[in-house]
Amino acid sequence: MDLTTLIGIVLALGLCVWGITFEKIGNFIDFQSLAIVLGGTIAATIASYPFRILKDVPKHIMVCFRGGKYNIPKLVDQLVDLAMLARQSGLLALEEKAEEIKDPFFKQSVLMIVDASDPDKVRELLEKTMDDMMARHDEAAGLYEKASAYAPAFGMIGTLVGLINMLKGMDLGGGGGASTLGQDMSVALITTFYGSGIANIFMQPIAKKLRVRQAEEELYCVTIVEGLMGIQAGENPKMLREHLLSCMKQSQQKKLLLKAEKAGGGGEG
């Protein structure tokens, strides 16, 4: 489980409260201002996106707290094992192995190289599937990026509402109005505070974490595609391992290559 999102949000809120001080926290609580900013942001976001995206909001939040789902070193080992099996028994032998794979994209990709004979067609189909997945993830992250833009805008709307009401209520010629100027001004500015807080404490971090998860999944899918294309082309398992490790960090490459050497150099088939 990845708690960095929760830790960051709690830390940001804590620092804001510490800066305000507990004694004055009541000055920053105004439910009408919160209704304008939070309600307006949610309403505008709902108006901007179809229900098929909005219904997945709970899943998006779970993704933010999910730990590392994609183990690239383990995936490379799996692909090398498949390459060795394909060299020894042919591509048809991979069909039985595919049934043991839980990840839908990985399983579908293995079955495609078993069933299809044209490598270019297989690559095209796999890349199209991967592009469709990334497009869906783009929409998910875009929802929170859009919400982070709406929140400060509604904060400004709330501020303008407050200022207009304040100016309308002023009576500089008589005895009322001016005495409450400071209080009315502070209430008007609270909405700007809420807008900035919602955008930068909640929406932007969620959007960024979804982008990070998207990049992890994209690397995972690209590794699968490149590995299976190499297997279909009959690439040497040892060379395939080095090819797939080229996109990883140097420290990870050295660790996995050392592990492969101890196990027998990845096998020559």
Image: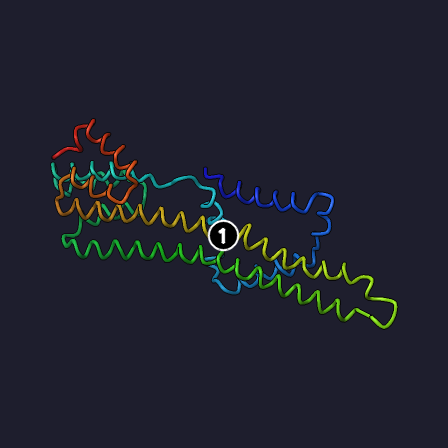
Q: Position of residue 50 (x, y in %)?
A: 47, 62
Label 1: state its secondary structure: helix
In the image shown, does 178 or 64 lie closer to the viewer?
178
Residue at the (19%, 48%) spot, across then down? 229
* Left or right: residue 185 compared with residue 146: right
Q: Position of residue 72 (x, y in %)?
A: 30, 40
Give the residue type that dot 1 points to: Val
Residue for badge 1: 57
In the image shown, does 207 or 81 lie closer to the viewer?
207
Q: Residue furthest right?
A: 175
* Left or right: residue 256 compared with residue 85: right
Classify mark 1: residues with Cα within 10 Å, few (<14), some (14-19) or many (20+): some
Residue at the (59%, 53%) spot, across then down? 197
Q: Which of the 4 image quarters holds residue 267?
A: top left
Residue at the (53%, 65%) spot, across then down? 47
Residue at the (17%, 56%) spot, across then down? 120
* Left or right: residue 124 compared with residue 60: left
In the image shown, does 97 or 148 lie closer to the viewer?
148
* Left or right: residue 224 compared with residue 87: right
Q: Position of residue 246 (x, y in %)?
A: 24, 43
